[in-house]
Amino acid sequence: MGPRSAAESFCLEGAPRERYRVTLYGSLAATGKGHMTDAAILDALGRERTELLWKPQVVLAQHPNGMTLEALSPQGDLLRTRTVFSIGGGAVVEDPGSAHEANPSVPVYPFLSMEEVLAMADQEGAQLWEYVDRHEESGIRDHLARVWQVMQEAIRRGLETEGPLPGGLRLPRKAAAYYARAQSAKGYLNVTGQLFAYALAVSEENAACSQIVTAPTCGSAGVLPAVLYYLKKQNRLSDERILNALATAGIIGNIVKQNASISGAEVGCQGEVGTACAMAAGAAAQLLGGTPHQIEYAAEMGMEHHLGLTCDPVAGLVQIPCIERNAIASVRALDCASYVLLSDGRHRITFDEVVQTMAQTGRDMNERYRETSQGGLSFFHGRCHAGGLRPRKEPSVEDSENPSEPSPGKGLD
């Protein structure tokens, strides 16, 4: 999504006969095939007039997901160039130092921390979602309604579709089977089975390159829709209440993006599934009658219990373990909400503290475990299937101008 939007914007600035050269760096190169990054760029710029260069070993200092776009004359002369960074959720920036605001000089939200948002809620007796209505543009409700519509459509499609997912793993879709079994189950298995099925449905739609919502990223998009869809059905909630919960989830995700990262390439899967779980836990707490402080507590738990989660997709595809992680995180999010609703909302570790901890943990994490498919599950799974476990050898990625088989990556994020 990010590289495509960057390519489209770059193309619009140029002349009709331009040729293009695009260089992908770091994680964006190492996992580009599975992200379908190449297909997105070639579709935006034109396959016949675009050259792609893959440099997985070259990591730009600003962010692991870097790309340079160059416009060339018909004779091959350089006309203009731009280097941008894909920071997660489809967002692309030229300066990751100010990556967490589309326009740093005019921020949409005046507060940068959950502490400040809670203080506003306490002082004015407001709900968290009202913070969104106050500071967003007038069309925010229409946007949230569209988001909710697409989330529901992704679940319904996913529950009706069977067969293998694209990619070399030939992983079968499971959402339809899980949903069928959940209908005949009772009690806890019925609840968890439905949540699993809804999260699987959205994640499988992502893996199949269908339309989903980044929540906050494509690779973690199954968690929030699953929780909202389940609670709407179970508690017969109005769409208006769901939109309020989406607004609250957006505040939670925005605080993470402003103060840490939602990019698996930058901080590991804790920044993707961890943030998604925090968003869903906070939204669920609100829908179940929680106070603003209980909502903050639920979000803190959702993030805290994903700290250190690596991003190591097997074969680089958004399938193993990504899809299962979405399903499990959806149940964990509802559990977090249930836990805090039995409390008075007081706790020791704040949401802001756990976000800072996640950012530091991500910076300390070895790059092999940050969406490069060069370590962890992907590496060891590949060794096992290549002839059993052998003496450990450190993985490496060959730097090539145009590798025949660049490593695939996760999802469309």
Image (spheres, rainbow, N blue to C red):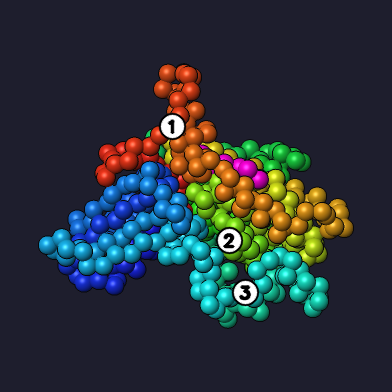
Using a 10 Å C-alpha cutoff, classify the residue at mark 3 as few (fewer than 14 neighbours), some (14 to 19) or many (20 or more). Answer: some
Quarter of the image with the N terminus is: bottom left
Tag on residue 395? 1
Mark 3 or mark 1: name the one nearer the start of the chain: 3
Tags 2 and 1 touching, CB below 8 Å: no
Using a 10 Å C-alpha cutoff, classify the residue at mark 1 as few (fewer than 14 neighbours), some (14 to 19) or many (20 or more). Answer: few
Name which residue lies at 66% across and 79% down: 134
Magenta segment boundaries in residue numbering? 306-313
* Residue 287: image location, x then y, percent: 74, 61
Identify the residue position indicated by label 3 in the image.
Answer: 109
Mark 1 residue element: loop
* Residue 387: image location, x then y, percent: 42, 18
Quadrant housing residue 409: top left
Marks 2 and 1 sit apart, C-alpha to C-alpha, by: 30 Å
The answer to whether residue 281 shows anywhere in this view is no
Residue 307 on the magenta span: yes
Identify the residue position indicated by label 2 in the image.
Answer: 257
Tags 3 and 1 touching, CB below 8 Å: no
Mark 3 residue element: loop
Mark 3 or mark 2: name the one nearer the start of the chain: 3
